Image: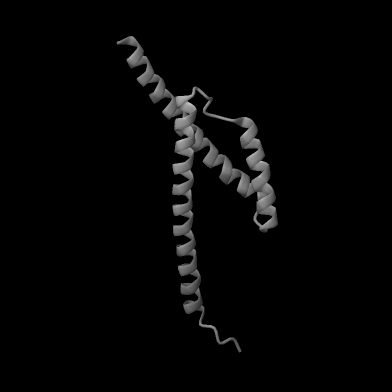
Amino acid sequence: MNDIDPKARLLELRASIDNIDAALIHMLAERFRCTQAVGMLKATHGLPPADPAREATQIERLRRLADDAHLDPDFAEKFLNFIIREVIRHHEKLAAEHNGASDKTTSA
């Protein structure tokens, strides 16, 4: 006979999921703070918003980590690609803003 109350266990599991979701959001926010700093550095020094070699290395690395963690590497790659696209979008926006500011100061 199983002594576990399924409703109580479900609540415990969902509480854990909620905590993990909160941690993920905080980790993503910190990651984007770092990538914003990278984007500013790139914009300031005229570096390209994207770095395909770095992206490929990161994807390979995360696929290995996912496999080691028994997470589907294809899912991990899709997730990272989504993040990379968003980071590049931010970097392109920062570069455009920086170039617009540079154009205004040089034309005055």
In percent of width and height, residue 86 lies at 49, 37
The residue positioned 57% from the left and 40% from the top of the image is 81
Number of labelled discs? 0
Residue found farthest to the bottom = 1
As rendered, which of 27 and 45 lies closer to the eye?
Answer: 45
As rendered, which of 69 and 48 lies closer to the eye?
Answer: 48
The residue positioned 69% from the left and 53% from the top of the image is 67
On-image quarter of the C terminus: top left
Quadrant in the rendering for residue 40: top left
In percent of width and height, residue 60 lies at 68, 42
Residue found farthest to the left = 108
In percent of width and height, residue 13 lies at 51, 70
In percent of width and height, residue 36 lies at 45, 37
The residue positioned 49% from the left and 24% from the top of the image is 45
On-image quarter of the N terminus: bottom right
The residue positioned 66% from the left and 52% from the top of the image is 65
Colour mapping:
one colour
